[in-house]
Amino acid sequence: MAGKGQVLGESLLGEEEEEEEEVDPGPPQIDPATGQVIPRPKKKKRRVNKMGRRKLLENLSNKPTDFQIRVKVLEARQLQGGNIQPVAKVTVANQTKQTRVKKSTNSPSWNEAFFFNFKKSPADLMDELVEFKVFNSKKLRSDSLIGSFKCDVGMVYLEPRHSFLHKWLLLSDPEDTMSGAKGYLKVCVCVIGPGDEAPSFKPVASEESDDIESNLLRPAGVQLQPATFTLKLYRAEDIPRMDSAFMQGVKKVFGIGEEQKELVDPYFVFSFAGKEVQSKIMYNNDHPDWNQILKIGIQFPSMCERLKFIVRDWDRVTDDDTIGTNILATSLISSSAGSGPEDDQFDSFLPTFGPSFVNFYGSTREYSDLPDEYDDLNLGKGEGVAYRGRALVEIQTTLGELPEVPVEDINNDDILRVQKFMRRRKYKLHAAFLNATMVSAIDAPVEFEVSIGNYGNKLDENTAPCPSTTQPTNAVFDGCHYYFLPWSGTKPCVVVESSWEDISFRLEGLNLLLKIIDTLEANIEQVRIGIKAKLPTPELAQLLISLLDQLEQDCRKKLPEPTPGRHVSNELDRLTRDYREFELETIANNVIKLKTSATDVLEAMAEVENYLQILKNIAKEPQNSMPDVVIWMISGDKRLAYYRIPANEVLWSQNPDYIGRLCGRLQTLQLKFPGLKAEKEKVSEVPAMLRTKIWLGLANEDDAWHRMQTEGELAVYAETYENQCNIPVVGWTKKGPLGRPKWSDSQGKCSLPRESFEPPPGWRWEGDWYVSPELSMLFDKDAGHKTYMEECYEMHSRLPGTSWGPATRPWTDVKGDEMAPKDSVDLPPGWVWEDVWQIDLSRAVDEEGWEYCVESTMGGYGPVEKRYHLCRRRRWVRTRKLVEDAKQKKHKLIQEKKIEEAAEGWEYAPLFNLKFHATERTMDMVRRRRWHRKMICEKKGADCYFAMKFEGKKKDEDDKEDFNAAYAAPRMFLTFKKPFKYQMRAYIYQARDLLAGDETGLSDPYARLSFLTQSSVTEKKEKSLCPTWDQTLIFEELEIYGDPRAIEENPPEVMIELFDYDKFGSNEFLGRTKAVPMVKLDPADARMPVLQWYPISRGQEDGGELLAAFELFLLAGSDLPFLPPKKGDLFLVPNGIRPVMQRTAIEVLCWGVRNMQKFQLSAVTSPSIEFECGGHVQESNVIKSTKKNPNFTENILFFDVMLPREELYMPPMNIRVRDHRQFGRKPTVGIHVLKSLEEFRCDPVQAELAEDDDGVQGGLVNGGRGGEHVIDMPAEERKVERKSGPQIGQPLKSFPQLELPALFRGKQEEPDPVVDEEIDWWSKYYASTGQTHKCKKYIEKGQDKIEVYQTHLEDVDFTNGFSDFCSTFELQRGKDEEDEESSVVGEFKGGFKVYPLPPDPNDEMPSKVFTNLPSSTPEECIVRVYVICGIDFQPNDTSGLADPYIEIILGNKKISDRDNYKPNTIDPVFGQMFELTTMLPVQKDLTIRIKDYDIISSDDVIGETTIDLENRYLSKVRATCGLQKSYCIAGVNQWRDCIKPRQILENYCKQNHVSGPHFYGNNSVKVGKKIHNLADYEPNKPVDPNVGPADERLALHVLHTLPMVKEHVETRPLFNPIQPGIEQGKIQMWVDIFPKSLGPPGPPFNIEARKAKDYVLRIIIWNTVDVVLDEESITGEKMSDIYVKGWVSGIDEKQKTDVHYRSLDGEGNFNWRFIFPFSYVPAEQVMEVRKKEHFWSLDETVQHLQPNIVIQVWDNDKFSMDDFLGTVSLNLNAMPMPAKKASSCKVSMLPDITTGSEVKLVSLFEQKRLRGFWPVYNDDTGTRTLTGKVEMEMELVSVEEAEERPAGQGQEEPNMNPKLDPPKRPETSFLWFTSPWKTLRYIIWRNYKWYFIGFLVLLLILLLVFLFLYSFPGEVSQWIVNG
C-alpha cells in the first residue's frame, strides 16, 4: 500500500505533520488481494517541513530518574479468524500486563489502561522495547498468537508530547512475514518523566469517525517485509589484553616450549531489536581475522533504531568480559525520506554500511587483575575514555528473505575485494602544550600523553615508541591556591606517527557542514541578542537578511568528492553525499523563498531554526573510522584525567573550507575525570586546564604545521638520565645495585648510554650534551606577583606505639624538601608580611589541620588518624606583599646565581620509584639528573627516532627491554625567546541566585579566579545568595609567550570558581564559570569591557550567575589606565564599567506569611520580614500570632534607593523571614531570592486630574488613581467604545459559549420553574465538552454551556495565577541538595511595584501605587467543592485498577467519603459536592486527595492537589464563584451566587473607580462612558422559561464583557510525594467560595452521576433461511443440524434455541424466544454492566459498553465440537434495518469498517420493535461471506412493561405476548439414533425405496427361475415317463 497513513518512515522521522484534507472521510478501502488499505485521493497537500531522518535522541543522561509509561489498549478490528476470544498483552521492558479476554468477536473493545513505573536512566529506557501482542485465548498457547507490533520507547519519546494518541497499529505475524496484516489494534502510549504533563487519553469528539487509515502506525513501506541484515565481519585489530599472564609465567618456569601469546580471546556480537548473533572465538589473538558473515532476520522496516556491535573476551571460568561496544543508528545508514523524485523528495535507501572500520572506546587499555572500576564504559554507557580496538565490517540489507543460517564464512572474492579498503597512509599528529594550569595532581611529576588509536599510548608495549608525552614536571604553587606546570619559554611538543585509511573526503565533508552550523548558530545568536535588546525592526531585518545570505552562500559550497587513486569510497559514501547535496540544495532554495516572503522576524527565525536542525541531522558521519585524539594526564604511572577530540576537528586540508575547526588553533581544554566516578563522589576540582594547539594531517603535509609555528622555534633534543646510588663509605657512584641502567629513560625501563646515541639519517647534532634540570627546580616561585602566599609544612612522626613528635625534618615544602622553621622563613627584600602564620583548614584535614599517612615519601595523606599511620603533617600559610623594587632587583641577581649552582641538576629520592626532590636528605639512596642534546634536521621529513648502537652485548640474552631501547624517541620543544608581559584586570561586580552552602539556606560566598599561572580571591560576603563584591582583582606582570596578535584573537580563558566559606573543614564548592577577557594590545585603547552575566554550574545543576568583566593589557611601554578607586585595601569596579544608577522607588506590599514549617522543633508564630535590595534593608512589623491572623497589620514598606538603570544589572530582592523568640533570639526561618524585579515595574502614578463624571475612562486608561485595584478596562471594552450599537456582542466571542437570544419583555411575572427529566447538570457538562451524543435534548434547547478548562484555573491565561493582588513567593531553607525532597518551608504573600523617582530630592514625590487595600482581618466563608470525575488514575492494585474515593482537607477539618468508594475503576465518575466552612486566610489551603480503598491494609494515596483559596478570594477576576451564562431563577441553570448580578456590577464599579452603574429603566445601563442596551445582547426572546428579571440579565451581560471568571470546570493534575513530579491522574472539579458576610449562598447544583434504567430485550427467532449446509449424511445429502445462539456482549450469558435437525435446504424453524435483561443509561447511550471479575472479588466492576447483541448460527454435532456457521453483531443504538423478504437480505446491509458503503441505521430504543431478516456471515478468510439469514423479531421493553406483559424464555410459560406455537418442521427433522422407525421411514425408505422394490422383484424372479429349474427335470422326466 502506498497510502499516506502515518508511515513511520515519515511521521517518526522528525518530520512535521503534513496538512491535508480528505476527499472522503469514510472508512478505508481494503484491497482484497493484499488485505492492505487502498490509498485515497488527497486534496491540497502542503509540505510543512521535511526533516528526512528520524531525530536522534542524543546526550541522554545516565542518571536514574522516575519514569512512567502509560499504555491504554482501546480496541482491535479485523483480527484474523472468526469467532475468536482475543486478549491483548503489553510488554514494556520485561514488565508484562494483559487485558481481559473478550468472547467470540474479532473486533473486541477493551478500553483498559496500564501503568509501568521505572527508575532508570533515560539512556537505558529509550532502548527498551514496547511490544503489543494479541492472542486467541481459546487455542493452545503454541499457535495462539494472532499478531504483534513492537517499537522502542525512544520512538514514542520523540513524538509530540512524548505520546502516541489514538493510533492504530498494524499487527503482523513475526514468524510468517509475507502473510500481511493480521488486524489493527488501537492504542495510546505516553512516556512521562518528572515535570511532564500527561496527555489525556480521552477520545476527542472529532475522532469518533475512527479513520484507521490516517492514524495508522505501521512500519514505513506499506507492510512488514522479512529482511536480513547481513554483517560481513572481516577482522579486528588493536584489541587490548584482557587475561592475566599467570599461566604463561608457569609455563615459562617449566620450560614448556610455547611462543609468547596475546592474552585475549575475542569474539564479536552483532545485535539488533533484541536478537543477537555471535562470531567464532579466536583464541589468544589480538588481531583476529574472523572472515565470517553474521545474519539477523528482521521485519522491515523495523521500529528499532540501534545496531549494536560488541566485542567480548571469552573466559573459561568467569563471565565473558565486554571489550567494547559500538552503537550505530540505522537512521544514519539508511534513508526513508520519500518515495521518489516526483514528490521532490530524496530516494530512500536500505541500511548499508562499509566496508569500513568501526572504532571501540571504553575504559583504559592497561590490564590489571583487579576489577575495572570503569567497566560500564565498555558497555557503551558514558563517554569512553580510551581506544579499545577497531573492527572492519560491512552491512547490507536484503528484503524478502530471512536467513537460513545465522553464521557462515566469507568467500575469498570478498576478502580480496576488501583489501583495497585497508590501504594505509602515514599521518602525523602534532600537539604543542602552551600552559597547564589548575593541575590537581601534586604528589608526583605530571606528564601529558597524546594518542590517536593505539599510536602514542606510552603504556602499550606493542607500538613503536614515539615522542607522544611531555617531559615529567612537578607542579608549582601559584601563590594563591592552584598549581601549574612551570614550562616557561620551552613549551613541550609531541608528535605521533600513525597509519590510517585515507578517509579525508568523509571528514572534510563533515567539517564543511560543522562550519556551516557554527556560522549559522553565531548569526542566530546575534539576531537573538538584537531581539532581546529590542533593536528597531529595520536593523533586525538587516541582521536577518545577512544571516540568510550567508546561509545560502554556505549551502551552495561544494561537498568534497573522493579522489580516484587516493580515496576508496563505498556505496554509503555515495548515498550520503547525494542526500546531503539534496538537503543543502533544498535549504538554499527555501532560504531564497524565505527572503522574499518573510514578514515577521520571529516566524523567519523559527524557520531558520528548522534549517539548523536539518543541518545538524546531516552533520553526522557514520563511517568515521579514524579514531579520536585522546589526551591523558599521567602522574607517576597513574592515568588521572583525559580529554577526547574527534579526529575531524583537528584534521588539516588543503582547502580552507574543509579544515577542522580546531586544527592548529589555540584552544583551552578542561580535562575530565574518567567515568561517572567524579559525578558520584561529587569531586568539585578541575583535573587540569590545558592550552594546546593540535594538528593532524598526512605525514607528507606536515610542513603546514611547521609554517604555523611562527612564534617560537621548534627544537628536537635527545634525552637521557644519569642515575647514581649512594653507598656508605664510597658515596655517590654509578656502580653498585642501582636497579636500573646507569643511563636510562625517565622511567628507567631501558638503557640509553650517551655514547650510543647516533643522529638518525637526515639529522645532525648541534652543540654538546648539557645538564637540563627539572623545570620546577629552577622556578622562582614569586615571580610576577605583588602578593604571594608563603607555605610550609610542619612534619611529625612516631614509632609504632609511641606518641607524636617532630620528624627528622620538622619543616618541609610541599615536595618534602627541608625548609627553615616557619618563624625563621626569610622575607625576600622588598616584601612585607600581610598577616601572621595560620593553619590551613580548608583542605581534607582534621580539626587541628593534620593529615596522616604511613610514610611521608610515599604520599597518600588522609584526614583520619589510624594506628598504622607513622607520619603526619599540617600546612601553614602566610601572605606577603611586594612594596619596593630596587632591593628586589638585587635579590634577583642573587637568585640567578643560585640557579647556576642548581645547574648540577641532581634530583634525590630514597628509591627510584618514589618521588624525587631537589635537596639531599638523609634517607636518600639514589639521585638522577637529565641530559639534553639538540638536533637539527637536514633532510625534510626524515624520521627523528634513534637507532641505538650497542657494542659487545651478548646476543643470547633475549632481553625485551633492549628491543624497545633500539628505538628511542627524542623530546621536542617549542622555544620562545622572551615572554610578553601583560596585566589582567578582573571586575567582579556581583552574583545572584547562588546555591546555598549552609544549613540556614544561605552561603558566605567568595570567588577565586585562575588565569594562567596566577590566581586570586575576592573578599567573602557573609550570609548572602546574591553577593555584591564590587571588586577589581589585578593580576600583575603575567608572562605570556607567543605573538600578542594571536593572544588577541584567541585569549586564554579566566576560570572563576565560587566557594562557600566555612570556618571548619574545607570550603564548599558552589560552582564555576569561564570567561574570555577583552585584549588591549594598546593600553590607550578606548573600548570599555561590558559587565556580563556568566552562568555558573556545579556538575549538572545550575548554580546562579556572576556579573563580571575582564580585560587584558599588553605592557608595551605606554602607561596603563589609572588604577580603579580603592575602598580600604580593595579596588572597586571603575566608573565606566559599573552600572549607571538612578533614584528608584520600590513599594512593597507585605501581606502575610503562610504555612510556615517548624524551625528547630518549634512553630514559627511571630515572624517579621526583612527586605534587602542593593544594600538597603527595610523590616516589616511583627505578626502577633500566625494562628489567629497570619497577615501583617501594616502592609506597605517603601524604599527610596539608587539602583542601576539597566534592568540587566538590577540587584535581586532578598526576602528574609525571621521569627521572634524568647530571650531576643531572631533566627532566619526562610528566605526567597527574587532574581528580577522586571515584572513589577510600572509607571509612577500621576497626581489626579479634577475630572467630571464622564472623564473616568481617561483616568482608567492611564492607570488612574486607586493604584493596585485600578483595572484597565479590558482591551475588548475599549474597542467596543469606538464602535456602536449591535457590535456590543463582540467581546463574548472569546468564550465559545452560546449567546443568549432575548427580548425586553417589560414587567413580567416570574414563571413557574419548568423541569425536564432528561436535562440535568451533566447535559450542560457534556454539551460543553463536545460529547453531543450524551445530551442531544439539551443542545436542541440551546441552553447555556460552561467553560471546561483542560488545566487548573490558575493556568488559564487571563487569571495569571490570581497574582494580580499579591503574588506567592516560596520560602526556602537549608542546603541545595539535588536528591532531597523540596526544601520549601513556607510562603510569603506580597507584591512589589518599582518605578523611577525624580532625581532631585526636593521634587514632589508621585502618589503611592498600593492604595485601597482590602481588609486583612480573617473572613469566615462557606466553601463548596464539586468533584465531577477522575481521569487516568494510577492504579494501586495488581489488577491494574483502583477503588478510589475522595478525601477533602481544609485546615483542621477533614471529610472522608470512604463509604462511597468507586470499585475497580481508574476513570471514576464521582458527581459529589462537599460543603465546609473556613476562616480565610488562616485555613486557606484546600487539599483534595484521592485514596484507594483497601480492606486489609491501610488505604494508599493515589494523588492529591492543593488549591490556594485565599488567592481566589483576593483576586480581582472574582474567582470565588464563576459567573453563570444566564440569570435563571429555577431549573438546571438556577443562580447559585450569594449576590445578584446587579450587586456584583455595583461592587466592581466601586472597587475599580468606574462611574456607574446608572440604570435607565430595566433595559439599559451606563457603566463608565458606555451605554449598554439589553436589546443588543438579546435580540430574540430568551428560550429558557426560567429566566430572571431584565435588569439582572443586563447586569450579567455587562459583567461578561469584563475580565471575570465564568462558570467553569477545571482539570487538576494529581501528584504523589512517592513519585514527585510524575502526574498520577487528573480530576475535574470546581470550587465556590461564599463569604458569610454577603449573606447565604444560592442552592447548590445537583451533580449526582446519571443512573442506569433497566430494560428487557426480547428476541423471537422465527426462522433461518439459506443457511450453508455443513454436513453430509450417511446417504450423501448435504444437510445441517441448525440451532441459533445469542447473547448481549459484555453480559455474555448465552441462550440457545432447540436444534432443527437435518435441514436439507438451509431452512430452520424455531419460534423461540430469547430474553436478555440489561441496564442502560439513555442519556449517554451506553449499557452498564456490573459483574464480579473473579469469584473471590468483593465488588462488582462497572463497565460502560455499547449495547451489542450477537446472534450466531451453529451446526450441532453429537460426537465432535459444534461447527460455527455464521454470526451477526447488532448495536441496539445503531443497527441496520432488517430486510422484509429473505431474497433481499445481503451482507452489504451491514455497516463495515472495510466497505465504506453507507447503511441506514436505526435505534431500537426509538423503534421499540423490529421484525425482518438479518444476514449472518463468516469472515475466517478475512472477507465476509454470507452463510445464512435469520428471521427474527426484536422488542425492547422497560422492566415495568415486562412485568405487565410477561413472556417466558424459549417456549416456556408464561408463553404469551405473543404466544409461540411449536415450529412446524418438516417430518424429516429429527435426530436419527433416537427414532429408529422414523429413520427407516424418512431416511432409508424415502431414499432407497426403488432399490428395495427392485431388489424384491429381482428376488421373486430369481425364485421363480430357481423353482423352475428345480422342478423342471422331474416334471420333464415324469412327462416323458407319463408321456
Image (spheres, grey):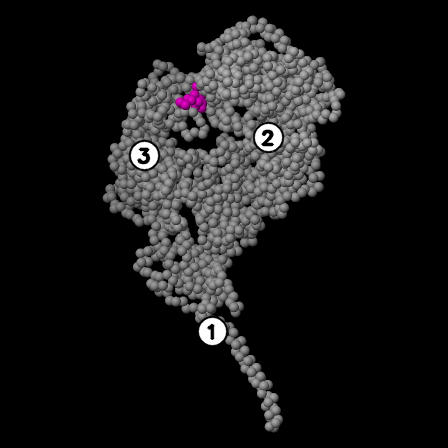
Mark 2 → mark 3, Cα distance in angstroms: 64 Å
- SS label for mark 3: strand
| Rendered residue at 46%/42% (across/down) | 71
Q: How many numbered marks does the figure carry? A: 3
Tell me if I can see residue 231 in this picture: no
Q: Position of residue 526 (x, y in %)?
A: 52, 26
Crowding at mark 2 (Cα within 10 Å: few <14, some 14-19, many 20+): few
Question: Callout 2, which amino acid?
Answer: Asp
Tell me if I can see residue 752 in this picture: yes
For disc 2, the marked residue is 369
For disc 1, the marked residue is 1881
For disc 3, the marked residue is 1450
Closer to the N terminus: mark 3 or mark 1? 3
Tell me which corner region of the image, top left, top right, bottom left or bottom right, holds residue 776.
top right
Q: Position of residue 1087 (x, y in %)?
A: 52, 16
Instruction: Give the position of the C terminus as an image quadrant.
Output: bottom right
**Closer-to-camera residue (387/1529):** 387
